[in-house]
Amino acid sequence: MITTSRKPTQEMVARAEQIAADFELPYHRRNKQTITEFHAHHPHVYMVGKAGRDVVYSRAKEPFFFHPSMATLRIQRLQNGEGDPLVIASRLMPGDSFLDVTLGLGSDSIVASFYAGTNGQVIGVEKQPMIASVVQEGLKNWSDDQHAALVEAMRRVQVVCVDQRQYLQKQADNSFDVIYYGPMFKQSVQQSVHLQPLKEIACYDALSKETVQEALRVAKKAVVLKAESQSSLFDEFGFKRLDRRRGTVTYGTIDL
């Protein structure tokens, strides 16, 4: 269900009603009801918050809201002349187009947006509507006076709520420089503090041969996969693994 924070503005109410219509979910005025009271009848409560800070509350779980996670530190490192594993793996360059077909919290897309710069293009595809909406609003409204480059990178990320395969099938050959997969694994969610709130609402679609083939058709430079270093996905789909140390998350590439 969809609601708002207490004492909402007319704009917040209008946005909540629009989200409810888009998601085909009921909208309830907040009035004096608590989130716990809403949970008596609804497992997930999407709350439209002030300044674009929307939150998804799931029963007995940590709330899900947008934050840049490790993107802040990664961009600082790039500004200091250090490397970033995603940038290195993808051979991303300023002005490149980057398609993230598993947006999630959007941290990787933010880093790619920073590095691709104002002449680049970054699109993040997210199948789960609640995640897509929360992240889209966060990218549009996040403020941080200490990290202007981070905020500018956020604003350039475009969010599309659709199934990744459907999106890829509609793209022309060689239309993106880099296509990136960072699929959600239950093991990753269990181990990462940042990803815990995603556990109940994330999409766990498995990588498929058909989807990878579509990505290879659409990409010009590389298709990149992020997964646990011991994941069978690298060998199964032909990705060259960059780090084989057990217990780490690493990147694999198919260079074109």
Image (cartoon, grey):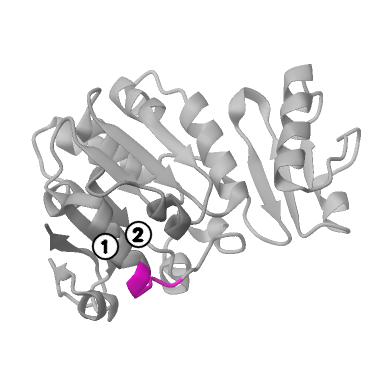
Q: Residue at horizontal 46%, vertical 23%?
A: 143
Mark 2 sits on what residue?
A: 182
Q: Is residue 208 magenta?
A: yes
Q: Nearer the viewer, residue 256 or 84?
A: 256
Q: Is residue 83 magenta?
A: no
Q: Residue at horizontal 87%, vertical 40%?
A: 28
Q: Are marks 2 and 1 in contact (CB under 8 Å)?
A: yes
Q: Position of residue 207 (x, y in %)?
A: 38, 71
Q: Which residues are magenta?
A: 206-210
Q: Amino acid at mark 1?
A: Leu
Q: In the rendered image, is residue 172 in sight?
A: yes
Q: Residue at horizontal 16%, vertical 63%?
A: 254
First reached walking from the N terminus: tag 2 or tag 1: 2
Q: Magenta part mainly helix, strand or loop?
A: loop
Side of 183 relative to 76 (left or right):
right
Mark 1 sits on what residue?
A: 225
Q: Position of residue 214 (x, y in %)?
A: 32, 61
Q: Position of residue 172 (x, y in %)?
A: 31, 46
Side of 66 relative to 170 (left or right):
right
